[in-house]
Image (cartoon, rainbow, N blue to C red):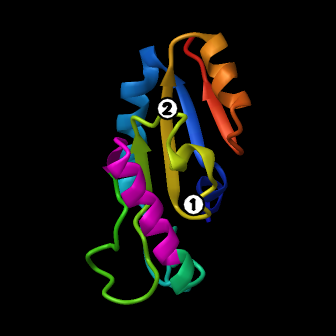
């Protein structure tokens, strides 16, 4: 499943000059992920492992929002699934290093997107302690 890799990658840092365009593309991609029973043909995102983890993910998303982050997409149950532990692929932007979502691993379909201006700034933020981070610098 494509989305398994997305769950492992929890943070992307983008150089400011490319951040807006990249974020738009990631949100468009997330909107088209088929969320369903994993045994169903074409499924790309199934449920999270348990009720406890489902609640933890929702709390992470809500906390990020209350701390000032933007939920660019997702963060809730898909409308077509009335039961089970399903959460839309979630893209969170405008993240700062002081936010819980930056400092702690979510273990769910949540991706934090943060921009940077200089390489030094990106290195400083990576050293701050985030795991599974991808840094994308424009040419």
Q: Residues within 10 Å of mark 1 (few under 14, many from 20)?
A: some
Q: Tell me the tag on residue 114.
A: 2
Circle 1 residue: 3
For the magenta stretch, what is the residue range?
A: 54-72
Q: Tell me the tag on residue 77.
A: none
69 vs 4, nearest the viewer: 69
63 vs 26, nearest the viewer: 63
Q: Is residue 51 above or below residue 105?
A: below
Q: In what element is the residue under mark 2?
A: strand
Query: Is residue 93 located in the magenta-colored stretch of the structure?
Result: no
Residue 106 x %, y %: 58, 59
Q: Residue at x 50, y 79 (%)?
A: 41
Q: Residue at x 33, y 51 (%)?
A: 66
Q: What secondary structure prevails in the magenta region? A: helix
Q: Residues within 10 Å of mark 2 (few under 14, many from 20)?
A: many
Quadrant of res 8 = bottom right
């Amino acid at each position: 499943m494509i989305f398994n890799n997305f769950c492992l990658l929890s943070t992307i840092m983008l150089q400011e000059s490319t951040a807006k365009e990249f974020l738009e593309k990631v949100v468009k991609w997330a909107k088209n992920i088929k969320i369903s029973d994993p045994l169903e043909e074409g499924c790309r995102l199934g449920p999270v492992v348990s009720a406890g983890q489902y609640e933890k993910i929702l709390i992470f998303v809500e906390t990020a929002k209350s701390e000032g982050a933007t939920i660019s997409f997702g963060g809730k149950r898909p409308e077509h699934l009335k039961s089970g532990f399903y959460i839309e692929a979630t893209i969170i932007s405008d993240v700062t290093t002081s936010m819980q979502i930056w400092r702690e691993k979510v273990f769910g379909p949540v991706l934090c997107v943060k921009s940077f201006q200089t390489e030094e700034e990106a290195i400083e933020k990576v050293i701050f302690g985030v795991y599974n981070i991808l840094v994308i610098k424009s040419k």
